[in-house]
Image (spheres, helix red, strand yellow):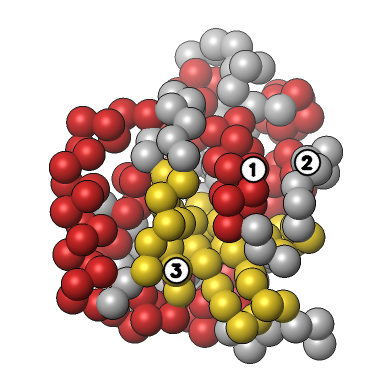
Amino acid sequence: MKRYKKLAVFGGTFSPVHNGHLLALRAYAETVRPDVLYIIPTAVPPHKKREDDATDAERLAMLRIAIEPLDLPCEIVVSDMEIARGGKSYTVDTVEILLRIADEVVIYCGTDMLLTLDGWYAYERLLHMVTVAYMQREDDGRYAVEIAEKVQQLTKTCGARFIALPPLSVEISSSAIRDSVRQGKDISMFVPEGVASYIRREGLYR
Ligand code: ATP
């Protein structure tokens, strides 16, 4: 089995994958410089209720369409490991498996996720195993103090290691895209063309 020195994880619901994810992925890969980037759609997100109507297979298909033209400075794997495992997708379980093929694992968090990190299942164990690369999301500038405090607190109490990625401030979220589709609005500036066509063709999010 292939072994990597540094493996970076980008997990999410990706319903659908959008340009915010893709820009964040590039900044993440260029800053962290992993040997391989694992993009892992979650099966049942423990942190948020599923309200979308895209199936696991459709989310994976959209990811593959979006990733195909990307030219990143590392190998890219779109992994169905959490979907195939089924049940709740706990990051700690995924990282434990990935540490069998990598010396070091880094995980990505937008600041919305970072602020909830100490509510994640077995987060102390998780933080002993990974470095967390985080990026300030569009609306999260107003939480700058909370974010700095959270980073400081988790560094002190759990020995957590963080990397701050340069913020992009792209105001795009999957939920806003799903709302736009429901309202019949144009989403072509928020997702790659191939993903927009897939959503149209399959009649998703209506
Ligand atoms: P939803 O609107 O349904 O909550 P989302 O747009 O937040 O979805 P997810 O698939 O849940 O998308 O996000 C996966 C990861 O990507 C999370 O860590 C999230 O914070 C991050 N992320 C999503 N959108 C952006 C963005 N515009 N800029 C930076 N990070 C982002």
Q: Which callout, 3 or 1, points at the residue further toward the start of the chain? A: 1
Q: Which callout, 2 or 3, points at the residue further toward the start of the chain? A: 2
Rendered residue at 75%/83% (across/down): 3
Q: Looking at the image, which is closer to me, 184 or 45?
A: 45
Q: Which callout, 1 or 2, points at the residue further toward the start of the chain? A: 1
- Judging by the rendered image, the residue that carries numbered circle 3 is 131
Q: Between marks 3 and 1, how big is the CA–CA gap?
A: 18 Å
Residue type at mark 2: give it: Leu
**CB atoms of marks 1 and 2 within 8 Å:** yes
Q: Nearer the viewer, mark 2 or mark 3?
A: 3
Coordinates of residue 64 in the picture (x, y in percent): 76, 48
How many other residues sit within 10 Å of disc 1, few (<14), some (14-19) or many (≥20)?
Answer: some
Q: Looking at the image, which is closer to me, 119 or 83?
A: 119
Res. 44 visible in picture = no
Residue type at mark 3: give it: Thr
Which quadrant of the rendered structure holds the C terminus?
Answer: top right
173 vs 155, left or right, is right
Coordinates of residue 120 in the picture (x, y in percent): 30, 68
- Judging by the rendered image, the residue that carries numbered circle 2 is 70
In the figure, residue 203 lies in which quadrant?
top right
User: Circle 1 sits in a helix, a strand or a loop, which is it?
Assistant: helix
- Judging by the rendered image, the residue that carries numbered circle 1 is 26
Rendered residue at 81%/87% (across/down): 1
